[in-house]
Amino acid sequence: MLEVESYRRLAATTLGRPITHVDASDAWFLKGGLIGEQVVDVLEGRTFIADRRIGKLLLLDLDTGPTLGLRFGMTGRLVVDGRASIDHLEYSSDRDDPQWDRFIVTFADGGELRMRDPRRLGGVELDPDTDRLGVDAFELTRAQLRAALGTSEAPLKARLMDQSRVAGLGNLLTDEILWRAALDPARAAGSLSPAELRRLRRHLLVTLRELDERGGSHMGDLQIMRSREGVCPRDGAGLSRRTIGGRTTYSCPVHQR
Ligand SMILES: [Zn+2]
């Protein structure tokens, strides 16, 4: 999600620039029943007037017509005018190949917005359904966090990563936040005391801001210890490695309770 936040800032540089050409020839990359001609029709001759982000979804509003929705999956990147905001993503190859450009918008000034995605896990949509997304993690109030966790018996980590409850938290971010907040990812989501809930929200917001400044969700303090020999950077205990909510989870058996 921090990657998408950086793409949003990059996409903001395209606002107000007339769109002259659209290459939407990769049919696989068009989602929600969209066809290439349709997206070309909607975009050409128009301009983007606003950039928004909800969780991992980037939204670009047009001066007239629908909203363009961009999803990046695990390997997608945004390139604007030849510039990428983040040069290294955990799951991306370091190589860069224009063959991976799945969707290209060209502006009147000759600049371009490209979605580059080696594994084609992302996609392009018009008017994506945002009703199914929870509150964006950056804007989460304490009451909203409490509501998102509810009285659920599901693991805390799984609930935090449920995009319909809290939008934007991925695997690495969630492990980092829970490690900093000293909370066991496997605990029942509904079991947090008011003090633990406050602590979780505080660490959640600080972690998002810090890692955004450092350059992405892979820049956490726990990150380099995500291996079988990893130890807790805080107390030196051997980290436990479990599958929680279907994802590989690292946590400290000593200080995360
Ligand atoms: Zn520890």
Image (cartoon, rainbow, N blue to C red):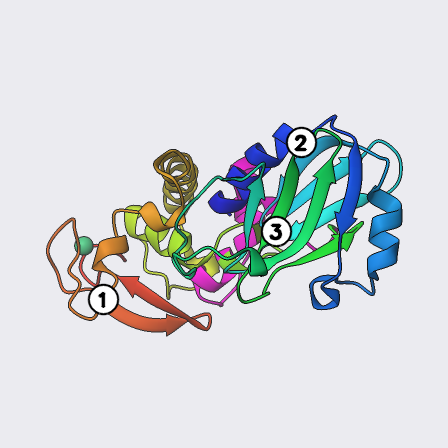
Look at the image and tell me whether residue 20 can be seen: yes
| Quadrant including the C terminus | bottom left
Residue 2: horizontal and vertical position, in percent? Answer: 47, 43
Q: Is residue 107 above or below residue 241?
A: above
Residue 120 quadrant: bottom right
Q: Which residue is at 46% across, 55% downward? A: 96
Q: Secondary structure at mark 2?
A: helix
**Mark drawn on residue 115:** 3
Looking at the picture, which amino acid does disc 1 mark?
Ser
Q: Quadrant of ligand 1?
A: bottom left
Looking at the picture, which amino acid does disc 3 mark?
Met
Viewer-proximal residue, 169 or 187?
Answer: 169
Q: Is residue 198 above or below residue 96?
A: above
Which of discs 3 and 1 lies nearer the camera? The answer is 3
Q: Which badge, 1 or 2, is on the more N-terminal residue?
A: 2
**Magenta span contains residue 140:** yes
Q: Which residue is at 46% across, 70% downward? A: 245
Q: What residue is shown with label 2?
A: 14
**Magenta span contains residue 232:** no
Range of the magenta residues? 131-160
